Amino acid sequence: MRASIKEYKAVEEAALKFVKSVAEGNSAYAKELFVDEAVLFGFLDGKMEHGSIEQFYKNVDTVAAGDSFKARIDVVAVEETLAVVRVLEEKWGGRIDFTDYLLLLKIDSEWKCVAKAYNQNSDTIQK
């Protein structure tokens, strides 16, 4: 069953916490979104990152997004208790473009992120 437009908006508002954390270089907003057990998978400058979402918090808190940072949220799918969100990021830290996928579950009537997987655009990889 397709979710209502209102539910899509709720998922988008949840994902905005992710974007706000990245844009401001402050993981506090993302910590409201992610469950403690959330996982992270992706490659940053060719090196695989995987494990606890704490690595994402560390990255956000140590690298300023910069004035040229831009982001877009696409709500890909919403089911009754499951949502998939794609976040496009440009110029994080002044140089990196990412595509993030967030997997959210509706837990106690609130959308929470349980996993983040990402791709760094190949033309922004620093070796």
Image (tube, helix red, strand yellow):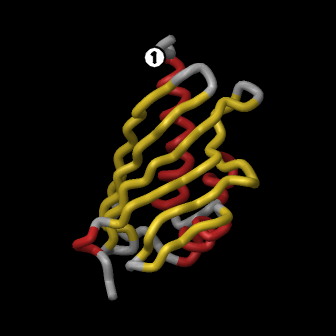
Tag 1 secondary structure: helix
Q: Residue drawn at (71%, 25%), measured in percent from left and top?
A: 109
Q: Foreground residue, 27 or 114?
A: 114
- Image quarter (top left, top right, bottom left or bottom right) of the C terminus: bottom left
Q: Position of residue 36 (x, y in %)?
A: 75, 54
Left or right of 112: which side holds 36? right
- The answer to which quarter of the image holds residue 125 is bottom left
Left or right of 90: which side holds 64? right
Q: Position of residue 42 (x, y in %)?
A: 47, 65
Q: Position of residue 7 (x, y in %)?
A: 53, 21
Q: Residue drawn at (67%, 66%), measured in percent from left and top?
A: 54
Residue that protrudes farthest toward the bottom in the picture: 127
Q: Is residue 93 above or below residue 40?
A: below
Q: Is residue 114 above or below residue 45?
A: above
Q: Is residue 73 above or below residue 76?
A: below
Residue that protrudes farthest toward the left in the picture: 123
Q: Residue drawn at (59%, 72%), measured in percent from left and top?
A: 61
> Where does label 1 land, which residue?
5
Label 1, residues with CA under 10 Å away: few <14, some 14-19, many ≥20: few
Left or right of 38: which side holds 8? left
Q: Residue drawn at (59%, 50%), measured in percent from left and top?
A: 115
Q: Position of residue 111 (x, y in %)?
A: 64, 34
Count up the numbered dots: 1
Q: Amino acid at mark 1?
A: Ile
- The answer to which quarter of the image holds residue 27 is bottom right
Q: Is residue 35 above or below residue 11?
A: below
